[in-house]
Amino acid sequence: MFFLTLGIVALIVGFAINTPSLTFSRFSRPVKVIGAVLIVLGLLTASIRQIDAGQVGVISLFGNVSDRTLESGLNFVNPLANVTEFDVKTQNYTMSATHDEGEKQGDDAIRVLTADGLEVVIDLTVLYRIVSAEAPRIYREIGPDYTDKVVRPITRTRIRDNAVYYDAVALYSTRRDEFQTRIYKTIEADFRKRGMMLEQLLIRNIDLPASVKRTIESKINAEQDAQKMQFVLAKERQEAERKRVEAQGIADYQRILSTGLSDKQLQYEQIKAQRELAQSPNAKIVIMGGRGNVPLILNDK
């Protein structure tokens, strides 16, 4: 458009100075030629529009939006038309309580009320993209700022609408995946109506109230203590069983001794013990069994 504007100005100046009374009227023709060349060059450059990869162009002329989109590369359009580019690559919109992490400065997390009346803080990332064929409709109905007009309000509203069906603890633990699937379906339907496609919904963090955190920690500690006590009881049962088996073994051994040893066997064991004593080099007194129990002194030094 720069060359086109400059050419028109030059053409007007050429006609303006085309007066014989003016000393520089002889430059009128060259200025007109230059103006015509600039106009042609301006029309050519304005008719060629380059669309980068991952972008589509929407053509509008005097308020009328064309349903045809310009794909990436060089495209020929009306030089007077306005081309607005839309990003059709995967985009993400993050809402987080961490400073400088989300799209908005400061705390931008989503605060919702659960079924038990507690406030839960959710950090969320939405992955989405624009459907190329729907870009002209988005430009007509929403405009280029579709993130603030559609993505952000729909996401926050649907999360609040669905969080009321879950308790805070269930939302944090057992039913987190179910909650994520539920809000994904509702947001996906809303995005589709607006010409966008929801690719993924990522619940990054769920922050519970301090009172609920203390309750969960107390429950976990109680469960750990119960498991520890079960281990101790199991160990004590095993020790009691070991002692019972040991006592039973001793009792069985004593019963076998009391019922299985005869007088002759005891006499034989006594003789063996005396023989071992007799072979010892130390002085000793041996009292032999029998009548009188006469003691014998062996190796008396």
Image: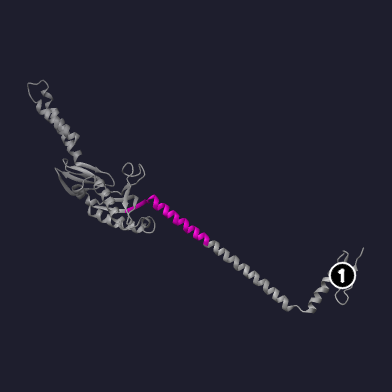
Stretch in magenta: 200-229
The residue wearing badge 1 is: 286
Residue 37 x, y percent position in the rendering: 16, 33
Q: Is residue 152 magenta?
A: no
Is 294 positioned to the left or the right of 252 in the image? right
Residue in the picture at 34% in, 59% down: 178
Residue in the picture at 19% in, 34% down: 2
Q: Quadrant of residue 262?
A: bottom right
Considering the image in quadrants, where does the C terminus appear? bottom right
Residue 229 x, y percent position in the rendering: 52, 61
Task: Please indicate, yes or no, whether residue 67 appears anywhere in the rendered image.
Answer: yes
Task: Please indicate, yes or no, whether residue 72 appears anywhere in the rendered image.
Answer: no
Residues 235 and 44: in front is 235
Residue 51 x, y percent position in the rendering: 25, 44
Q: Is residue 223 magenta?
A: yes
Residues 133 and 19: in front is 133
- Looking at the image, the residue that sits furthest to the front is 292
Give the prevailing secondary structure in the magenta stretch: helix
- Identify which amino acid the numbered label 1 is placed on: Val
Q: Secondary structure at mark 1?
A: strand
